[in-house]
Every structure is written in structure tokens, then in C-alpha cells.
Image (cartoon, rainbow, N blue to C red):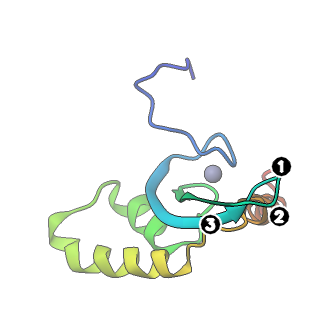
Amino acid sequence: MNGSPACPPACPRCRFGEILAVLRLPRTWTNASGRPVRGLGEVLLCARCDAGDPLVTYFAVHATARPEHAALLARLLRQWAARARPEGPDEDALRAEAEAWRRGEL
Ligand SMILES: [Zn+2]
């Protein structure tokens, strides 16, 4: 690891996993002064944190999206997007950490 900018973006949760997909969802939250703020919530699909996701399994097997798998990939992406929630990134991080613990990676 040399910190080269040519490296693929690393996951902000585990700092190691490769980001396979990014979902940007409109999101409203309340800032520190109690006012609603609108923005985009990002949901990242990490090869490491989301190792159990069928989409991650696909990329683990095939390395890259293949045109002949377009229908399958579309389905997996839709399923992932349906599960993905931008609210509660801390909860995601906690869950990822708990899963890493369970797998004995920490
Ligand atoms: Zn990660």
C-alpha cells in the first residue's frame, strides 16, 4: 500500500474494502440547531463490509460486470438498493464491526 491516487477508493467504514457501488439517495436530517437539512445520503457497497451481499459475491466471482449478466446484475442492484438505507451510517459501521468481530477479523 503506497497511498497512490490510482488506487480504487477505499471504504470509509473499514478503510480496506474496495467500493463496488455507490447509491446516492435524497435525505433529510436535522442539524445541531434543530433545522432540517436536505442533501444526499450515500450508501456504499463495500467488498469487505458487505461481504454477505449477493452483489459482492457476484464481483468476487466475476471481478467485473459482464454484459451477458446485465439482467442478473440489474436484479441484484435493485435488491441492494431496496435494502440500502442512508439513515444511520453509524449503525452500519457498528454492524460491520460486529460482523468483523464475529468473523474473527479484528
Ligand atoms: Zn468496508
Query: What is the spatial separation of the Cα atoms under label 2 and label 1, in whole angstroms?
Result: 9 Å
Image-quadrant location for residue 87: bottom right
Q: With 75 as the anchor, is 82 left or right in this view? A: right
Query: Image height check: is 54 above or below 65?
Result: below
The tag on residue 98 is 2
Residue matched to label 1: 106
Local SS, label 1: loop
Residue 21 in which image quadrant: bottom left
Work out whether mark 3 precedes mark 1 in sequence or the reverse, and give the earlier one. 3
Residue in the picture at 39% in, 79% down: 78
Q: Does the beta carbon at disc 1 come under 8 Å from ligand 1?
A: no
Residue annotated with mark 3:
28
Q: Quadrant of residue 10?
A: top right
Q: Which residue is drawn at 39% across and 68% down?
A: 58
Residue shown at 76%/55% (left/top)? Answer: 31
Residue type (three-letter) at the residue carrying disc 1? Leu
Which residue occupies 33% across, 60% down?
Answer: 62
Q: From the top left corner, tell me how far across and down residue 77 is, in percent.
A: 38, 73
Counting residues from the N terminus, which is met first, the one under dot 2 or under dot 1?
Answer: 2
Determine the secondary structure under disc 3: strand
Secondary structure under tag 2 reads helix
- 10 Å crowding of disc 2: few (<14), some (14-19), many (20+): few
In this rendering, the label closer to the viewer, 2 or 1? 2
Three-letter amino acid code of the residue under disc 2 = Ala
